[in-house]
Amino acid sequence: MDSPCRVLVIDDDEALGMTMCAALETVGYAAAFNPNAPEALKEIETATPDLVITDILMPEADGIEVIRRLRGKTKIIAMSAGERIGADVYLGMAQSLGAAATLRKPFTLDELLVLVEKVVRA
């Protein structure tokens, strides 16, 4: 039996991160959540997940740094609401740096699950 795809969600919004993990687990993914990007990057050094879903704008470290450090090592989905300059700018930058896909906040759990399935199968 194949082991489930391992997904790490990195977002400073704990409620959103936990909700995303719960949704991913209901369809068979092994999901973990970390609200702190520097800590998550340290964890990834010892056990790289199959997919990382990261917010772009976070207090301790941004998702752009996460993408730069992980590109080529695992698949990445970047998400952002944009805040100051707009989500499209941040998400475009994320894709140019190696994110496999992007999600604009707010999104539905169905949109998340469809995108995750698409990226995992690619």
Image: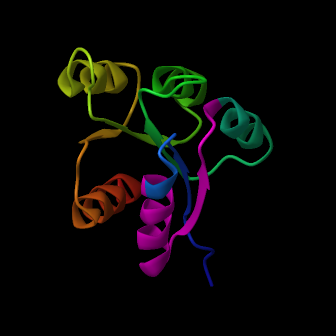
x and y, in percent, of residue 84 in the image: 26, 16
Residue 31 among magenta residues: yes
x and y, in percent, of residue 89 in the image: 23, 18
| Placement of the N terminus among the 4 image quadrants | bottom right
How many badges with numbers are in the image?
0
Instruction: Point out the residue furthest to the bottom here.
Output: 1
In this view, the residue in front, 45 or 16, is: 16
Which contiguous range is marked in magenta?
16-37
In this view, the residue in front, 50 or 56, is: 56
x and y, in percent, of residue 14 in the image: 52, 51
Residue 100 among magenta residues: no
Quarter-of-image position of residue 6: bottom right
Quarter-of-image position of residue 59: top right
Left or right: 75 in relation to 78: right
Q: What residue is rendered at 25% in x and 43% in y? A: 105
Left or right: 28 in relation to 109: right
Q: What residue is rendered at 46% in x and 21% in y? A: 64
